[in-house]
Amino acid sequence: ISSSVVFGGLICDQLKDSTIEASCIDSATNLADEMRCNHPVFNGNRTNLEKHMMKMLAENEDFDGFMTYIRKPKTYMETFIGKEVEKYIKDNRDKVQNILRRNVENITKLLIKALHDATRAVKTQRGNIEMWVKEFSRLTEHKVKLSISCEGFSDIDNFDFLEEQIETGLTSNKEMMGDLSPDEIKKYRLQPDQILIDQLCNCCWVTCPFCSAVCTNTVKDHSPDKHSAPFHRPTGVNGSRITGTNNIVVESCTTLVASDDAFKPHDPDVTIPYKQYKKAGERHASWEITSDGSLLPFWKWFTYRFQKELEERYDLRFTGKGEIPNNWGEIKKEDAIKSLDEL
Ligand SMILES: [Zn+2]
Ligand SMILES: [Zn+2]
């Protein structure tokens, strides 16, 4: 009997840690699902997420953030997802704690059922403790890991008593785990933000060679289909200058590809007309840029609002042919943000 008490205690200790781990992993998945359904930032596709990200950048007038987003859109989006998830957990601690509690309960239920089933099986087959452990592990291994040696416990033959011992232990474990902190989730391999990154960022991230707009194709490798984006930006936001001057380019790609202007792709001796941009090499040729002259008010507002910062960043000037059209300054931030709804 004392052997059963010791052995049962060892099993319960092990199951406690693995129940916490399994509950956190299940909760990470539940939490990601929950946010995919109910959180406006996550309940659409990547374009929707990008819209929220740009909105926040505009609201905070965060120039450095904009620059990181323009230069490294994928990295920036992943960081944004991480921050949003952290904020969500912080703002919804009760909800997260309930999810954790529910998972602890489900796993405890599963363990108790396996406990009964293993005991019944060993009793009918007149098995020993080794068989009991094997059977219990088989029934629970999809959720929790148990690795315990039966050495020194071969005398255990009252399986009803062992079952009782373990059930009592599991129930008190469950009570102790009733108030797991939402921060506990962060300690394990599966994180809610990583799940969302896998779901939302697994698409094409190739950027426009002129303005750095991200291709909106939802398939990662979609060749031979060309990259495309419904909205391009003034190419100056990416540091483009008018050849031979220090003037920033304020036109968007959709205007440039219809113009009679030219650009220098890499080699200073080579000049390519924008109309033939696909001749500038593979990177340019892989893009389909429509020449409809479209430009979101959002980017007009951005260019006007951050003209000094852009001039400093690229050591260029909004003068001469790079002068900002007067009416760009009249666009209000709210209207700029509203224009993102066209995305
Ligand atoms: Zn572009
Ligand atoms: Zn693409």
Image (cartoon, rainbow, N blue to C red):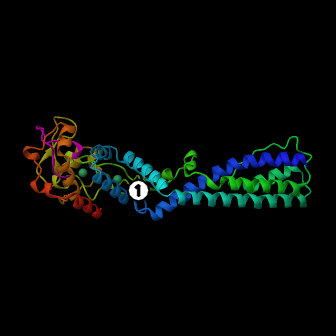
Percent across and percent down for residue 57 are 30, 51
Residue sitting at x 58%, y 51%? 181
Answer whether residue 238 is magenta in the image. Answer: yes
**Left or right of residue 288, residue 50 in this image:** right
Q: Quadrant of the C terminus?
A: bottom left
Q: Nearer the viewer, residue 59 or 30?
A: 59
Percent across and percent down for residue 54 are 31, 54
Cβ at disc 1 under 8 Å from ligand 2: yes
Residue sitting at x 38%, y 52%? 204
* Residue type of the residue flagged with mark 1: Val
Instruction: Classify residue 116 by image quadrant.
Output: bottom right
> Which residue is most to the top?
268
Residue sitting at x 32%, y 54%? 56
> Which residue is most to the left?
320
Examine the residues drawn in magenta and state their main secondary structure.
loop
Answer whether residue 7 is magenta in the image. Answer: no
Q: Nearer the viewer, residue 279 or 300?
A: 300
Label 1 SS? loop
Using the rendered image of the protein, determine whether residue 267 is visible from the camera's viewpoint: yes
**Left or right of residue 26, residue 338 in this image:** left
Percent across and percent down for residue 279 are 22, 46
Residue sitting at x 17%, y 45%? 307
Instruction: Classify residue 266 by image quadrant.
Output: top left
The magenta stretch is: 237-252
Residue at the disc numbered 1: 219
Percent across and percent down for residue 123 are 89, 59
Q: Give the answer, above or below, for where 221 lies relative to 281.
A: below
